[in-house]
Image (cartoon, helix red, strand yellow):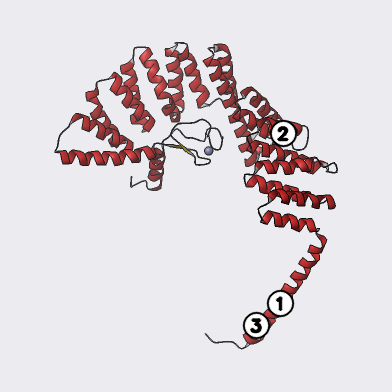
């Protein structure tokens, strides 16, 4: 590449421009710093020295001198709550709210932030008081969302229902097309769906509480309320079956679950254990085992396979087990099925040398470890993994974010989708 002589002329120009920019910047900074009171810098120093209490005092001093420093309080409060120093965050917001000269908008913001800080500190009662103060103000919607969150985490289902109902009404008032999905935005649709899902589950929770009390009519009303909110709700329809079964009405229970299984096969893994109990109660355990085996063949679900294996060993001829497992494994190859197959084989044929047997035990041990890892459910929203199925994710508290499928099934489905010819 040839060196061009023009560059020798241009380079000094760049240097000169850079120097001018630096001078201008430092002059501007010096002018700005003159405007700031001394306590501002003291506050910053204390913060840097890890002395947050002194920092608060110094920064509060700044706000006495200059009433336009509300943002400083918010920044401080945010800083403390982000660092997990909730008590300090609470003090900052409380201090801000106590200022008599504070105007309406920052007062509402500070009250909301104070409520959120109480909430992250686990002080639900005090958080509730803050959010209740915001009802009737411009922050009402967000405050009600937080209140619904508080009530559901406290399992105050009735109050949670009241709050979600109010949220739905507010949303509809603000946007008459809210429930009309075709003309609402995606965000509004997601919000409407989340509210409706929560509402259906709150009713289901109340139905379960009533069933524990054997209050059948209240339980039935709650199940119906959940179905009115979401007619396809798997949980509400499955509860309807449980409601019959709890009153020894097993034929009706089985009919309810079988209808659900036919209409929404994804619900089957959640139903099989209850269904088997009703088959047994009706002295039809052989039918139950057969039904479960067919469902395991049709769905390839690990939960159904487990339920069938349990029932087969308990209620049916165990000599059939191996051939049936073989057929299942051929149709739906999975580590879980392989593990069960190996276990069944080992029970049948205790043969081979001691060395061979110990090698086989080692391989089984490795497979079992892997099976355990892959036997979890995963939240589709936050990725939290759990050994049990949850209707509400314990980590992100969203409803119905766990598909009733074990990780291994999800991985298998993904693999077949990505490589349809190479299972
Ligand atoms: Zn989650």
Which of 151/204 is in front? 151
Q: Is residue 133 above or below residue 211?
A: below
The residue identified by callout 2 is 131
Q: Is residue 227 at least partly visible in the picture?
A: no
Q: Nearer the viewer, mark 1 or mark 3?
A: 1
Callout 3 secondary element: helix
Residue indicated by mark 3:
11
For the residues labelled 3 and 2, the Cα–Cα distance comes to 61 Å
Query: In terms of sequence position, does the residue under pointer 3 or pointer 2 come before the other?
Result: 3
Q: Secondary structure at mark 2?
A: helix
SS label for mark 1: helix
Q: Nearer the viewer, residue 186 or 5?
A: 5
Q: Position of residue 286 (x, y in %)?
A: 30, 17
The residue where tag 1 is placed is 19
In the picture, the quarter occupied by the C terminus is top left
Which residue sits at x=19%, y=29%?
348
């Amino acid at each position: 590449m040839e060196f061009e002589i023009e560059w020798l002329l241009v380079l000094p120009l760049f240097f000169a421009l850079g120097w001018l920019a630096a001078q201008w910047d430092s002059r501007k900074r010096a002018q700005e710093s003159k405007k700031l009171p001394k306590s501002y810098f003291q506050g910053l120093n204390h913060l840097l020295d890890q002395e947050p209490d002194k920092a608060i005092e110094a920064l509060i001093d700044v706000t006495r001198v200059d009433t336009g420093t509300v943002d400083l309080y918010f920044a401080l409060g945010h800083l403390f709550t982000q660092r997990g120093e909730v008590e300090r965050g609470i003090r900052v917001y409380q201090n801000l709210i106590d200022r008599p000269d504070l105007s309406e908008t920052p007062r509402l913001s500070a009250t909301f932030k104070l409520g959120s800080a109480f909430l992250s500190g686990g002080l639900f009662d005090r958080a509730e008081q803050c959010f209740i103060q915001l009802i009737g103000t411009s922050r009402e919607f967000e405050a009600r969302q937080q209140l619904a969150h508080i009530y559901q985490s406290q399992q105050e289902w009735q109050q949670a229902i009241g709050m979600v109902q109010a949220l739905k009404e507010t949303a509809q008032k603000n946007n008459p097309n809210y429930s009309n999905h075709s003309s609402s935005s995606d965000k509004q649709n997601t919000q409407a769906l989340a509210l409706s899902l929560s509402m259906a589950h709150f009713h289901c929770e109340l139905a379960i509480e009533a069933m524990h009390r054997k209050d059948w009519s209240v339980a039935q009303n709650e199940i119906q309320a959940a179905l009115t909110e979401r007619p396809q709700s798997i949980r509400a329809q499955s509860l309807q079956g449980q409601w019959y079964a709890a009153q020894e009405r097993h034929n009706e229970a089985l009919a309810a679950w079988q209808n659900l299984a036919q209409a929404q096969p994804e619900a089957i893994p959640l139903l099989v254990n209850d269904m088997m109990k009703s088959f047994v109660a009706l002295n039809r355990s052989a039918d139950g085992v057969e039904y479960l085996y067919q469902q395991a063949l049709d769905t390839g679900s690990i939960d159904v396979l487990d339920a069938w294996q349990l029932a087969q060993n308990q209620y049916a001829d165990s000599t059939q087990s191996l051939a049936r497992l073989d057929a299942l494994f051929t149709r739906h190859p999975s580590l879980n099925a392989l593990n069960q197959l190996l276990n069944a084989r080992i029970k049948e044929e205790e043969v081979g040398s001691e060395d061979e047997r110990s090698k086989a035990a080692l391989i089984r041990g490795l497979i079992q470890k892997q099976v355990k890892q892959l036997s979890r459910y995963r939240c589709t929203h936050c990725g939290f993994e759990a050994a049990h199925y949850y209707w509400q994710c314990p980590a992100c508290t969203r409803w119905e974010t766990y598909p009733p499928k074990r990780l291994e099934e999800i991985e298998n489905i993904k693999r077949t989708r990505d490589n349809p010819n190479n299972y």
